[in-house]
Amino acid sequence: MQPAGHKSEGLFPKEAFRYDAAGNVYVCPAGQHLKPHRFHQRREITDYVADKKICAQCPLRAQCTHSKTGRSVARHWQEQTLEVALAFARLPEARADRRRRQSLMEGSFAQAANQFHFKRARWRRRWRHQIQDWLIAAVQNIARLTSCA
């Protein structure tokens, strides 16, 4: 997500471009094809770029890009999975779950970080860090049990 006031504000969003899986291209609102150009291994993203000559003559250019080299669209290698996950995250049930978690869980995490000084992992490796998490949970449960008695 881009911050408010970003230079792409007022231009066609990525959703205005249609992805054609068969040809592995994006189709712009004017019907032109954006082909894969760069592959970012670390970010797992492919940049799809339009031909700058075609982009320069496009009647929708002012609504599409300010770039001299033409429009580009980034696509994550797991884009379909991300779209499904975002659709689930936008459901009212998911929002209610996040609100519930905020009131139930986040206070517990903050207590572990602030009261028990567990802002950082004490040990390396995932299995050792999981032991630390279990210890934090045990201390919190014991504290909760003793305060109720």
Image (cartoon, rainbow, N blue to C red):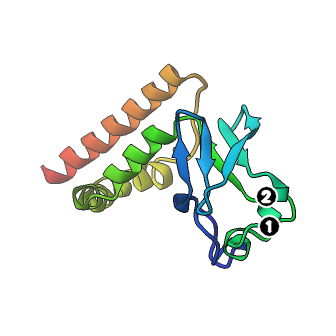
For numbered disc 1, what is the local secondary structure?
loop
What x and y, as percent, mark residue 88?
31, 50
Residue 9 drawn above or below residue 69 = below
Count the labels in the image.
2
For numbered disc 2, what is the local secondary structure?
helix
Residue under the point 54% across and 62% down: 16
Residue under the point 46% across and 47% down: 116
The reply to whether dot 2 and dot 1 touch (C-beta < 8 Å) is: yes
Mark 1 crowd level (few <14, some 14–19, many ≥20, 10 Å Cα): few
Residue on which the image places disc 2: 54
Residue under the point 28% across and 46% down: 143
What x and y, as percent, mark residue 138?
31, 35
For residue 76, side relative to residue 112 (left or right): right
Tag 2: residue type?
Ile
What x and y, as percent, mark residue 28?
61, 57
- Residue 15: numbered disc: none
Q: Which image quadrant is residue 45 in?
A: top right
What x and y, as percent, mark residue 122?
58, 33
Q: In this view, which residue lies farthest toward the left? A: 149
For residue 72, side relative to residue 147 (left or right): right
Tag 1: residue type?
Gln
**In 3D space, how far apart are the residues under numbered discs 2 and 1 (Cα atoms)?**
5 Å
Residue under the point 65% across and 35% down: 44
Q: Quadrant of the N terminus?
A: bottom right
Residue 105 drawn above or below residue 129 = below
Mark 2 crowd level (few <14, some 14–19, many ≥20, 10 Å Cα): few
Residue 23 drawn above or below residue 17 = above
Q: Nearer the viewer, residue 53 or 46?
A: 53
Q: Nearer the viewer, residue 96 or 116?
A: 96
Residue on which the image places disc 1: 57
Q: Nearer the viewer, residue 38 or 131?
A: 38
